[in-house]
Image (cartoon, rainbow, N blue to C red):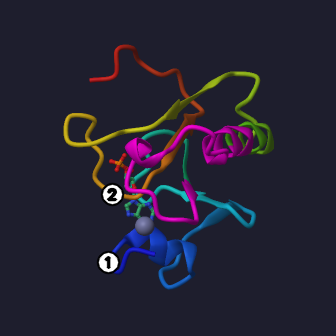
């Protein structure tokens, strides 16, 4: 746990969130500023600053992807499609330094993303 990390606090129930999915390793919750009809943030409960903190052989990313799959089915966006996004660092516009994926759906997405 990183002391002042808001996603660590959400993972520990020290801050509230609208939970969509939870298991021992991962928590998913509705984004506080949704950019699409479905906008879920998926985080590992363990603190990783970004995707750059992931070592070869770490299974957390595969697990997050399978969780995204499950949530997309549960929320009814699997058939129409969706976007799974990871922002990394300054140019990636990562604003919370705790690894997370955005699951966005419920409307057509644009490409390229700004
Ligand atoms: P990023 O810009 O990729 O770092 O994404 C961080 C995301 O976390 C943004 O979409 C924020 O709206 C979202 N966010 C920040 N604080 C909270 C919170 N307390 N509960 C839910 N989502 C949050
Ligand atoms: Zn954290």
Residue at x-position 68% and y-position 62%? 25
Q: Which residue is mark 2?
A: 96
On whether residue 46 falls in the magenta region, the answer is: yes
| Mark 1 → mark 2, Cα distance in angstroms | 11 Å
For residue 84, side relative to residue 2 (left or right): right
Residue found at the very far front of the displayed protein: 56
For residue 15, side relative to residue 80 (left or right): left
Tell me if residue 103 comes above or below residue 34 in the rendering: above
Residue at x-position 73% and y-position 67%? 24
Residue count near mark 1 (Cα–Cα under 10 Å), binned few <14, some 14–19, many ≥20 = few
Quarter of the figure with residue 48: bottom left
Q: Which residue is mark 1?
A: 4
Query: Tag 1's secondary structure?
Result: loop
Report the image quarter containing ligand 2.
bottom left
Residue at x-position 28% and y-position 52%? 95
- Part of the protein shown in magenta: 43-67
């Amino acid at each position: 746990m990183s002391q002042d990390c808001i996603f660590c606090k959400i993972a520990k129930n020290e801050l509230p969130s609208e939970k969509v999915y939870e298991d021992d390793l991962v928590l998913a919750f509705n984004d506080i500023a949704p950019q699409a009809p479905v906008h879920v943030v998926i985080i590992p409960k363990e603190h990783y600053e970004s995707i750059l903190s992931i070592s070869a052989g770490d299974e957390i990313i595969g697990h997050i992807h399978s969780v995204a799959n499950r949530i997309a089915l549960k929320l009814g966006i699997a058939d129409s499609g969706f976007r799974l996004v990871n922002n990394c660092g300054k140019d990636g516009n990562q604003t919370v330094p705790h690894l997370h994926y955005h699951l966005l759906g419920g409307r057509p997405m644009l490409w390229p993303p700004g």
